Image (cartoon, coloured by chain):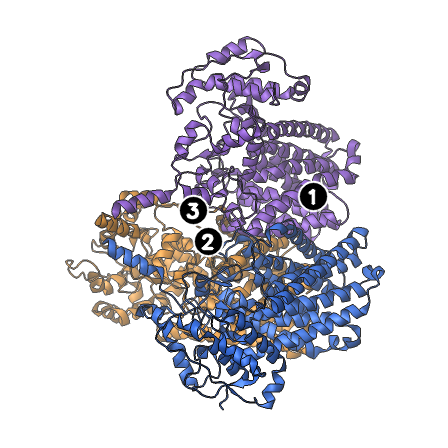
Chain colours: A orange, B blue, C purple
Amino acid sequence: MDGASPVARKEADVAVTVSAQAAAHVQETDIPYSIACSVPSSPSGLHLGACASIVRMATEVSLDTHHHGATAEAPQLLSQTGHPTLTISTEEPWRDRRFDHLKTFSSGSRVERQVSTLHPPAEIEVADSKISEEEEEETGDGDGDGDSENEVPSVDRYFSALQGRELETLRATEVSTLPDGETWPFLLRFPVSAFGMCLGVSSQAMLWKSLQSEPSMAFLHVSPAVNQALWWVSVALTAFVSSVYLLKAVFYFEVVRREFCNPIRVNFFFAPWVACLFLVNGLPRPVAAIHDSHVVWYVLMTPILLLDLKIYGQWMSGGGRRLSKVANPTSHLAIVGALLGALVGLHEAPLFFFAVGLAHYVVLFVTLYQWLGTNDVRLPKELHPVFFLFVAVPSVASMAWARLCGEFGFGAKIPYFISLFLFVSLVVRINLFFRGIRFSLAWWAYTFPMTSVAIATTMYASSVNSLVSRVLAIGLAGIASVTVTGVLVTTMYHAFVRKDLFPNDVSIAIMQRLNKPKHAVAQLARCIL
Amino acid sequence: MDGASPVARKEADVAVTVSAQAAAHVQETDIPYSIACSVPSSPSGLHLGACASIVRMATEVSLDTHHHGATAEAPQLLSQTGHPTLTISTEEPWRDRRFDHLKTFSSGSRVERQVSTLHPPAEIEVADSKISEEEEEETGDGDGDGDSENEVPSVDRYFSALQGRELETLRATEVSTLPDGETWPFLLRFPVSAFGMCLGVSSQAMLWKSLQSEPSMAFLHVSPAVNQALWWVSVALTAFVSSVYLLKAVFYFEVVRREFCNPIRVNFFFAPWVACLFLVNGLPRPVAAIHDSHVVWYVLMTPILLLDLKIYGQWMSGGGRRLSKVANPTSHLAIVGALLGALVGLHEAPLFFFAVGLAHYVVLFVTLYQWLGTNDVRLPKELHPVFFLFVAVPSVASMAWARLCGEFGFGAKIPYFISLFLFVSLVVRINLFFRGIRFSLAWWAYTFPMTSVAIATTMYASSVNSLVSRVLAIGLAGIASVTVTGVLVTTMYHAFVRKDLFPNDVSIAIMQRLNKPKHAVAQLARCIL
Amino acid sequence: MDGASPVARKEADVAVTVSAQAAAHVQETDIPYSIACSVPSSPSGLHLGACASIVRMATEVSLDTHHHGATAEAPQLLSQTGHPTLTISTEEPWRDRRFDHLKTFSSGSRVERQVSTLHPPAEIEVADSKISEEEEEETGDGDGDGDSENEVPSVDRYFSALQGRELETLRATEVSTLPDGETWPFLLRFPVSAFGMCLGVSSQAMLWKSLQSEPSMAFLHVSPAVNQALWWVSVALTAFVSSVYLLKAVFYFEVVRREFCNPIRVNFFFAPWVACLFLVNGLPRPVAAIHDSHVVWYVLMTPILLLDLKIYGQWMSGGGRRLSKVANPTSHLAIVGALLGALVGLHEAPLFFFAVGLAHYVVLFVTLYQWLGTNDVRLPKELHPVFFLFVAVPSVASMAWARLCGEFGFGAKIPYFISLFLFVSLVVRINLFFRGIRFSLAWWAYTFPMTSVAIATTMYASSVNSLVSRVLAIGLAGIASVTVTGVLVTTMYHAFVRKDLFPNDVSIAIMQRLNKPKHAVAQLARCIL
């Protein structure tokens, strides 16, 4: 047995058994049906321990395939055996190799992996083979940041291959590099935007701490237990999501890289740290010792600083990921990280993060208002929950500034009022929001701004203690909690009833490039002349 | 007699008698000359009272037509009867129906109106008939805000059909939907930018209050009477303009809607409220009780808040009216409203408006400096008085911040100095301003920024009481007063001597769409292939 | 002898003797070799005194030509005579007239000069003759600021004719209006960016004054002598560079105008005043009386105010030099001038300059982040030292605000931290900076930001006196000093060893316009149809 993970191997096996026919009708009609001969065996103990929780998920996946596979005899067989999650294939020659180019530890050597990356599977190559030589040279043109390997599509490629506010749908003209008629391995379908769940729940923990501890909300007599319960749930959720994503990073590093290069997804890489910062701020008193710990702060802020240097630097240096190209509402996540860092912390460093966040927020705010980052053609008629991220940054900024100054003065009230206006501005358009938009995990990220504005309002109410401010605080807290509950229920519904919480993540399956339109033009020109 | 207004009816009649021949040569050569059989009768007493001042204006209009009409026998007959303003037509079948599609209460039912809107008069349909089916589907594409009825042209349409800094001239390629050889009914020609007059005069009232009450200006011994006189004049003017525009809104709601969709004009919808805020601030002491009234504030700020939510929301939501498309110097009016709201007022709400105004001002300022809102082709070589609106926002912001803080500190001085620099920057280019630019009512809006900067300077001089600051205050107040006087004289000249103060307002007469260039391209392509 | 300068004349002579053959192979092959009959004589005493230092430079130039000229007999003869710098030509008919159209005082009358400007030398006219009539009318279209003479190329022309981050290279499709096979007269090759040297050295003087006087740096016991030595060197350097450039302005005013219209170079016109402001701030105590002199401040700030009015006004008024067209990192120099003015000074005026600088900095910062000023096609893959100018403005702003407030508070710390972040963001990409970028005098301008951030850090360390801040201050001061030393050495190397410190300045040699691409399109269209 080689270094490949038993879990990943298993999933690949499950997938291949189901998708044989599906894959067949994609491209090659001559390949005979391959039946997977899964040899049930026990994985190594070490892996079993680490992946305990994955196993259950994976079981769902294999069950899930029942609903999708056209000819699902093999999986039925699998589930009849009683322990489908432990099936591990040996090195059969007919093993499913279609996901190998994304695996960190594939069966072959690293060299083989690189070769397989350069030579994608046959069905892809057919579509790819027409790309002329000069296009090869263009690869990575738009980067300007030195990390332009051939393997990762450029930002332009993402925009041209995908559509939707979250770039979540493949365009009609595109061919997926992964089999699109079946369900992929679970880890491949687990997007980084799943950290949105952590954001939503951990910010709720902080909100309920505010409702309990802010003087203006004392009349509510909120029990500390709510905060504690939410906090521990958040911790558990964050730990779980982090573990799964860590596994993805280990076994499918290539996919993580592709998510990092995706102009929408890259912003979600801030989410884990933002969630942790919410946790630190929402800390119940019994565990409050952590709050004053310098170590926690340094541990959390180092990755945020590095990400800031990376992301903001790319905005500035003007390559393919310059701001006017990649700006979109999720970019706010990159700012929230810096500003929340200002909320926790020590003497001068919080101000550093506040200053950096502020400077880039101004740039982002102006750019988004100007809609530079988005081509006209991609503008759908309806709004999108993603817009609520507009509210997040000013509300977090107001909290951060109040913390830095020690009082909720003008400097805190101005961003607070801006966030309030933006919130109202979105709420009056609420009927435009949920028109024909597919639920996705990312929605969680779009709900935490409501929680942020509610927390800021409780702080504002403590400073300006009037009836209006208190009603506002309670109202916004109510909206935020109801929204999070609603999204939670929807998530449960999609996870357990419809079982489509984790659809195939097409954004990792786009090819490096496609036949460009200029070919058509050239052909037309030739035809004319 | 049906529900149609006698005034509106009368105007239409006057128009039709004069324009018979003019209309004839526009499109249909087969229609015999129609002579209006006006039946003199008394309008209902209620309308007569409300429209007292309109009557005089309308008389001017009918006199005005003498100069324009080619064959003006009928109007001469009309004026010989001695009471032309009271002529009301009965329901003749040959009644002029060319303005019906703009009327709120046309002779037919509402359904008929809608039908007539969908089927514009014959001469329009001829030009319109070539629009292919697929273009119909494109209607309202660029909106993204849900209010895209078929009837109102899109923002792109306004830009493509009109030209000039104020979009006040029809392009050569366009066909007007209204008869362009004659003078239209008065209400159709009364633009929302007429509120600019209120801005100019009411800001002068505030300036003279400052000159009288600011400690730094005490040595001038300005009489309170100046402020009082200007204030009452402003009140009267604002009331008059508001009444007339209200009548327009009642009788030609469609036209008001078209003005609201015009990317330039929409900003003037802030003007009435801004003028009222100037009035509240310029209040002479005898009536100063109003100043402290909460009711006045709420009455004035509610429409501004609603407009802000509408306009700023459209900037943000990224449809056809997104900022990078509609930004132009008149957009400053949308900010001034919010900031002036911060000048009057109570405890926290002024700061709310200040924050909202500030955030959007930064966006607007950057966007205007980048000249994103304007295509290159539309850039005339000369500057335009509209640029003085650049000065308005920072000077109002400095006043507002000084009021919020209780002193003219750094926060007030910085915007003040910015406005001063912008003012000087424009004044040194003054020779470029009045080169071949047609006077229009909108000029009034371009003069109030000078008054604003003068008021801010008197406040600054009270804070920094030096010779330089006092000379500056007197100098700027002088420039502002002279300019307003000059514009007043010009207005009088155009109103009473040249009688062209209210020319035909072509911007309401553009068609929904025109044969698009792509047709030409397609034709060329077909011709080539 | 006419009014022309002996120095300029001499240089032209030296040039012509060398470049006879070079010029011949450019265009005209029929012209026989012309040998310069230089008549040694003494220039007027006045000029001799003023140009003392130029003489040595000019000698280098003539020596320099040895390495470049193909047939260098004549210069050798010249240098053998022992006093080649004093050779002055009389009015020979075969005098080199190729630089005459750039001279302020050419041999003919002013009218002749203008004629010669309109009719450039033969080899230019050949390339120019194909420009059709309608293109003549387009000249100066994009200006909008009233100073669009025919003679100076438009901003678009600079962008289309030149390439590189500093627009320092002629594109392959361009023909130079000056002989490109030889070395031009020294003054023609002395660019305004030479003032960058003054910036680098004078900011060092200020840094060492800070290291000596700031309380936080007292433990270093820096000797005042370092500051004094650097200051006097800076004064001498600034005086020298200013004198030479003044000579250029006198004798080749047309060239200075062309540099002023160059979108990159125009920003360097702030450099002399910025350098002087550094000098005033870096003033050693023995001569500190100057610091408090109002006269010095007014003398320095008047040109900056005028330049600000000119440059910022052009950004705003939206002509061919509007911000979204000309924005580039060197535009920061235009802001630094205003902010440094805030550092020196009196009561209110510094705040005026701070406000003006701040407002335009926000606009510039956003615009540069959005990369509006640069077309995609012109984006090289590697970064450039010019990016360090990003660091300059916020660090100077933090110093200015600290001086205005009297303490290094939040308002100073926020810009300071922004500059620190930007600095780190650039340093981590340092390996991208020096990849294939040619050294030029402009590099000096790119090094002074490091010095600025070091000075700001010493001030910060005095406010927040911790180990970290002191280490940071010393580290940054070290980096700045080492960098300046490195650039100094490189400059010396290029000046004395490679003798290419002042290469031909192609940006002054571009033609007004070239055959536009539309001609090609039209030709293609004709060919198709």
Farthest residue to the top: give it: C81
Element class at badge 1 = helix
Element class at badge 3 = helix
Which sits in the foreground, B98 or C147? B98
Residue C44 image point, x, y percent: 66, 17
Name the amino acid, label 2.
Val
Residue A125 image point, x, y percent: 24, 51
Mark closer to the chain start, 1 or 3 = 1
- Residue C475 appears in the rendering: no
Chain identity of mark 2: B
Q: Is residue C397 above or below residue A94?
A: above
Residue C93 placement, left or right of C391: left
Structural crowding at the residue carrying mark 2, measured as other residues with C-alpha within 10 Å and reported as few (<14), some (14–19) or many (≥20): few
- Residue B455 appears in the rendering: yes
Residue C341 bears which disc, if any?
Answer: 1
Element class at badge 2 = helix
Which sits in the foreground, C505 or A449? C505
Label 2 vs label 1, nearer the camera = 2
Q: Residue at x 55, y 82 (%)?
A: B7
Name the amino acid, label 3.
Asp
Name the amino acid, label 1.
Gly
Q: CA distance from mark 2 to mark 1?
A: 38 Å
